[in-house]
Image (tube, helix red, strand yellow):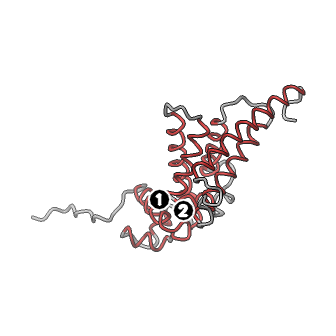
Amino acid sequence: MRSQLARKPLNTYHHGDLRDALIKAALREAEKGGAEAISIKALAKQLGVSQPAPYRHFADREALLAAVTAEAFRQFNAILREAMAKPSKQSKLSRLAQATLDFGLRRNGVYRLMFASRTVSCAAKGSELHAVTHETFGLVTEALEVPAVGYLRERHALKIWAALHGVVMLAEQGLFTGEAAHASREDLVEDFVNETKVALAAAIKATKRRGKPGA
């Protein structure tokens, strides 16, 4: 007598499993071509599910992109934390900066999903994506290893963050090789780190001397 329990198809996902599978598959596509490479229709076909199935977990492509980008930032933040926690003669800021450069060049498709699409700018306050991006900036601020004095720390965190982003994007476009300055990308990043630390220390000292925090 045949069992009344039918074997479950290999491509059938439990509730919740499909959401995770879609995010992982979308990240793999982003590795190849950034946000532009992510298609819900193509992902459904790749995972062997019906076309409507992904929409049980994501209202539209933008919702999927937000979830994928949040996961990318979580992975990025984990890498930054690991770099900052390692015993080293280098400063935390140096380790964070070099880890950012490595991530941006090695996983450029994902980096562009995170920093060169409108997904983050469209994230609602309080959303998962909004929270995880603020966590990233918090790590940059922490890496400066100075107490808060007005908004000086945050201002310098933004400056070096912008500089790092510029190096990654120029390198990705083939516009920066370091030949003109006879310096590697890593050397230039280290220059940014040293200049940032010197400038921040001077700004804090001047502010405390004037007795006007944040001036």
Q: Nearer the viewer, residue 188 or 135?
A: 188
Whichever of labels 1 and 2 marks the residue nearer the N terminus, that label is: 1
Q: Position of residue 45 (x, y in %)?
A: 40, 73
Q: Position of residue 118 (x, y in %)?
A: 66, 63
Gap in angstroms between the C-alphas marked 1 and 2: 7 Å
Q: Residue at x 53, y 57 (%)?
A: 105
The answer to which image quadrant residue 170 occupies is bottom right
Q: Are marks 1 and 2 in contact (CB under 8 Å)?
A: yes
The image quadrant where one finds the N terminus is bottom left
The answer to which image quadrant residue 66 occupies is bottom right
Secondary element at image label 2: helix
Q: Nearer the viewer, residue 152 or 62?
A: 152
Residue type at mark 2: give it: Leu
Q: Residue at x 79, y 37 (%)?
A: 151
Q: Callout 2: 10 Å neighbours few (<14), some, many (20+)?
A: many
Secondary element at image label 1: helix
The image quadrant where one finds the C terminus is top right
Q: Position of residue 91 (x, y in %)?
A: 59, 34
The residue singled out by tag 1 in the image is 23
In this picture, residue 14 sits left or right of residue 106: left
In this rendering, the count of numbered labels is 2
In this picture, residue 142 sits left or right of residue 30: right
Q: Nearer the viewer, residue 97 or 198?
A: 198
The residue singled out by tag 2 in the image is 64
Q: Residue at x 64, y 50 (%)?
A: 130
Q: Residue furthest left?
A: 1
Residue type at mark 1: give it: Ile
Label drawn at residue 44: none
Q: Callout 1: 10 Å neighbours few (<14), some, many (20+)?
A: many
